[in-house]
Amino acid sequence: MNQLQRVSRSTILNRLLRSSLAVVCLALGATALISGCASTPAEPQSMRDPQADFSAYKTFAWNAETSSGNAGQPVSVVDGYIRTAIATELTRKGYAEAAAGTTPDLRVEYEAVKAEKVKNNPFRVGIGVGSYGSNAGGSVGVSSPSVKNVEEGTLVVHVIDPARNTEVWRGTASRELGKGNVEPAVVQTVVADLLSDFPARGGQP
């Protein structure tokens, strides 16, 4: 192999290396762009009665007649997950579940519903690497927007002061549902987000 051939091959290898690095950087940039444009769960929404004195509330109980499902019906597996998650968060915030037969300071009820919605993906980016020795080291293709139907679950929690017969706090959170079964850990995460700004007692977080 003469010197000219060695230089030519070295030049091609250097071009390929620079092109490959450029494609990798482009891929990383495109990934970051897609991540930034991807839909993220909406922030939970809440409302609070400004006249409610949460420092006076200590206990809570379920409003069995109006919580998810009809009165007298057995509690479903998902309802069990929701109740456990809500009780865990309220306990962490300093409230105690009222003993059976006693009147609680707060009654908790909730609604869990799911519905289909249209999801629009802004665009997709495809990245390819050119063949060895070609002038172009890579290529990028951008596809048109895609639309699909997804299921979204919404959880609404109502907290009522039975003495005043008034709702003192309400929170709502929505999440896109996957194809599998609802997992307790997922429910706990959603409920924790939903109740994040529920007033705590005694300096609890």
Image (cartoon, grey):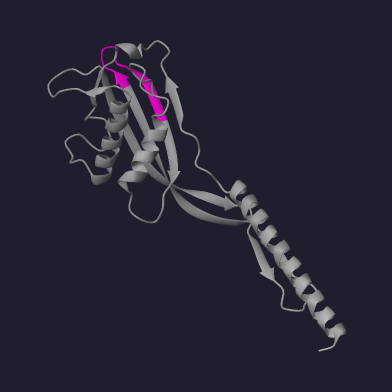
The answer to which quarter of the image holds residue 114 is top left
Q: Percent position (x, y) of residue 179?
A: 39, 56
Residue occupying the point 36% across, 35% down: 191
On screen, residue 146 versus residue 64, left or right, reads right
Q: Residue furthest bottom?
A: 1
Whether 166 is among the magenta residues is yes
The answer to which quarter of the image holds residue 85 is top left
Judged by its main secondary structure, the magenta piece is strand
On screen, residue 52 versus residue 77, left or right, reads right
Residue occupying the point 37% across, 12% down: 52
Q: Percent position (x, y) of residue 55?
A: 33, 12
> Measured along the vertical axis of the image, is residue 3 above or below residue 16?
below
Pick the front one: 94 or 148: 94
Q: Residue furthest left?
A: 101
Residue occupying the point 33% across, 16% down: 202
Looking at the rendered image, the quarter that the C terminus falls into is: top left
Looking at the rendered image, the quarter that the N terminus falls into is: bottom right
Boundaries of the magenta span: 160-171
Q: Percent position (x, y) of residue 51?
A: 40, 10
> Measured along the vertical axis of the image, is residue 80 above or below residue 20?
above
